[in-house]
Image: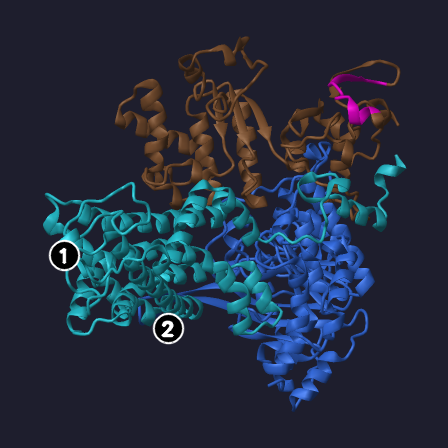
Chain colours: A cyan, B blue, C brown
Amino acid sequence: MPDLTKTSTTDEAAAAQDEVVAGAPVSATPAPGKPRSLWGDAWRDLRRNPLFVISALLIVVLLFVAAFPGMFTDANPETGDQAKHFLGKPELGHFFQADWFGYDGTGRSIYARVLFGARNSIVVGVGVTLLVTLFGGLVGMLAGYFGGFWDSLLSRITDVFFGIPFLLGSMVVLNGFTDRTVWVVMGALAFLGWTQIARVMRGAVITTKHADYVVAARALGAGTKRILFRHILPNAVAPVIVVATIALGTYIVAESTLSYLGLGLGGGAISWGGDISDGTQFIRNNPHVLLFPAGMLSITVLAFIMMGDAVREALDPKLR
Amino acid sequence: MAEEPKKDAADVTDATPSVSEVETVDAATPEEAVAAIEAPVERGEPILQVRNLVKHFPLTQGILVKRQIGAVKAVDGISFDLYQGETLGIVGESGCGKSTVAKLLMTLERATAGEVFYKGQDITKLSGRALKAVRRNIQMVFQDPYTSLNPRMTVGDIIGEPFEIHPEVAPKGSRRQKVQDLLDVVGLNPEYINRYPHQFSGGQRQRIGIARGLALNPEIIICDEPVSALDVSVQAQVINLMEKLQDEFNLSYLFIAHDLSIVRHISDRVGVMYLGKMAEIGSDEQIYDHPTHPYTQALLSAVPVPDPEAREGRERIILTGDVPSPANPPSGCRFRTRCWKAQDKCAEEIPLLAIPERFAGQDTPAAHESACHFAEEKDVVHAA
Amino acid sequence: MGILDMPPGKIPQGEILFRGQDMLKMSNEERRKIRGRKIAMIFQDALSSLNPVLSVGYQLGEMFRVHEGMGRKEAKAKAIELMERVKIPAAKERVNDYPHQFSGGMRQRIMIAMALALEPDLIIADEPTTALDVTVQAQVMDLLAELQREYNMGLILITHDLGVVADVADKIAVMYAGRIVETAPVHELYKRPAHPYTRGLLESIPRLDQKGHELYAIKGLPPNLLKIPSGCAFNPRCPKAQDICRTEVPPLVPVTEQDGAELTGRGSACHFWKETIHG
């Protein structure tokens, strides 16, 4: 059997090229140059996930409303017509009109207030998430990568902040401010909220830094910057994105809770939390004053949490 | 810091009489050091000389302030030479320190003591440009083809990364072509340059890892269990490729593996490690057909041979007990706790790695370095 | 073993005869009686097959308490006896230790002890030594062979290591892509393989006892079980493949000598087995 024992190098090269991914025959290989990254795969999974499609649509609409609330209503959310519309009931047939969701205790259109309130809620939610991801991510990355003394120090600091109750802490902080602008509220929430991201990031970096491909890069003589940003960060960022997306919802709740307690945005700023707080006094006879802002808050938070879950499923390699 | 006093080198050769003498290079400036590293080495001359290499991993306790409570003696004083153009196999069971040796030679771990001379310069003391030049010439192929490639990078980026780190090797415009050439060399379709690692099989990924190792035109490739994660039928493909590349690019391989059959197939010389020490080293025929160290004999006799005829005829040595912990190795000879020949002398005196006295000066294959007080020849591979 | 026959695993057809009874037609209750008592199994990864929060002695004794209704004391004594049987040193002191306190080889011994507990007729060992170092593998295989003789049990050894089979087995069945492609007594198989896959496999492994030349490499990849090639599953990688191999699944047929003389226990699922063995 001479044909069995003989192996020329060309045979072997041909053999290697034969072993096309997943055993597909050579002729059926799609354009060999076509890239398909893990992110690309995740995106393909996401597009097929109804959970993601619904939450993404909701979020796009919410972001659009937050950016251009004036496009959806002519009514002024700030001033009300006490005489005519005081506590007017919702007219559910009047789509996109001032009286769609009814009027509140001072005769202001609840529809308009819900639209304009979206801006503050979402700005605070997104802003806090960005701040927290940047700061917490940086702390977690440094602690995880450098380890040793820096890890011990940064981790202990993280633990100290982790020990402070999030809401109670931000109430204490915000109580010290009389002029509570969007920035102040965002700062207070981020100040106490970064620990979760830092912990997740630290864990992900520690796992990634021992991966063989990081060792391989070091063996090639790659510097710290290249290793951190080319090899570790892209592989460690997935869990952080998931946690951040879910946390975004909770920051919106936190802002609303603070507003409800009278410690949120000051200066008559429109906020779902503030409106929910106002609505509680009419809950028996005019529940709509409470119901619409509360419903919007729930839908928004739900959308972000659903999105986070969908992203987690798509990015988690263990589920593949 | 490439300077190495001659006297130290002489001491080292005293301790292990049978390894070749190190000709150190005195390089006063980084330029001289780099020039020495760039100089070619004749085939058959030593290119890498390891002398009394030691690596202890401290065991610590405490949260903020760490206290050392002991050390894992992963590598505890090993010496060997790697000659230009040869394949030196290092075998041993898990925990014997063979992977740590690979990391030390790659300067991925800092040696606790000892020297690694690459063309006469101690690379454990190099830094900066000279170290970078060494790194270019010593490359590594990893065990696990699934974890050694960054999943977020394309094959082109992975194989091209060495050029970005060492831009002097290939000018920017030529890199894509170089990467495609490398893919071709390792038997992959050059059009796969934009694909991601997860689109390849294990064998193909290992080829990508080999292409990355070849990119900088290195002289030495350290292979840490390069085929143990692959399917049996694919192992042969990768081994044949590695042998072909060695001839084509004039490479020296340090081939670390636990599979003794594969090591015999690919190696010219073989070193056997046990608990951080080199037990025996010699040519492939000397080690496999004429082993003199009891551990080598036990190890070889334990390997099942795919030949049912051998099962009655071969002598089997079944060792008792497990490998002791490297954090607390036995005194004297490391192997004495499992050795059937052990005597008082073995507990008191550490046997040196040298040609045993009884074979010294004789022209027999048994006359090779073996770290045993009672070395004697025994064929355990072939059926009687 | 009848473990697979639980969702999501399904056995669409066929039969498993154990002492003449089809195990697939039995009720779960009947099958449970056979499992462990008559047929026992040894897994590859001893650490994940043992419960980490229960002591080894407790887990060994559990077999006796459940199957034979023994008391706690009696079961423990039995556990120690078993541990001594599989040559675990200082069994009395170690009976209360937890799985992680044992080395890999010792854990595999405990798995063997557990399989032996009820003195089964048949042991199925799935890659029992793959995770172990060679010297420890030799210890464990040695023990297994010794106990097999002592208890007079059947042993089905599932492994990818052609060396281990050559050492232990009497008969061998070679599988590829879910089918048996060749059966033969051990000496015959290594001397004269009758299937190109077996042949390729034997030629692709480096040898300990001789310095080989270039290895024969079976081209291509192991099959994807979702896309098994039509006809003979090995045809895309086979050097002898013809058109018939791509269309017709070769049945496992008896292999004979050139003159037609019967070869006991030999079979090959190759259209060209004659050429392969006699060619």
Lateral position of residue B36 relative to residue C157, left or right:
right
Residue B369 drawn above or below residue B310: below
Residue at mark 1 shares a chain with residue at mark 2: yes
Front-most of residues A186 and B19:
A186
* Neighbours of disc 2 within 10 Å: few (<14), some (14-19), many (20+): some
Tell me which amino acid carries mark 2.
Trp
Badge 2 is on which residue? Answer: A150
Q: Earlier in the sequence, mark 1 or mark 2?
A: 1
Give the quadrant of residue C192: top right
Q: Quadrant of the C terminus of chain C?
A: top right
Report the side of B197 relative to A260 (left or right).
right
Looking at the picture, which amino acid does disc 1 mark? Gln
* Percent x, y of residue C228: 68, 30
Residue for point 50% across, 48% down: A317
Residue B89: which quarter of the image? Answer: bottom right
Name the residue at the front extreme.
A84
Which residue lies most toward the bottom here?
Answer: B28
**Residue at 29% of width from left, 41% of height from top?**
A93
Residue A116 visible within the image: yes
Q: What residue is at 35 percent from the left and 19 percent from the top?
A: C67
Residue to which mark 1 is pinned: A82
Q: Is residue B379 visible?
A: no
Q: Is residue B132 above or below residue B356?
A: below
How far from the left and from the top, in percent, is residue B65?
31, 72
Please state if C176 lies on the left or on the right of A109 as rendered. right
From which residue to which does the magenta span run? Answer: C244-257
For label 2, the SS is helix
Q: Position of residue A284 (x, y in %)?
A: 10, 43
Which of pointers 1 and 2 indicates the residue nearer the eye?
1
The secondary element bearing badge 1 is classed as: helix
Chain identifier of the residue bearing label 1 in the image:
A
**Is C255 in the magenta?**
yes
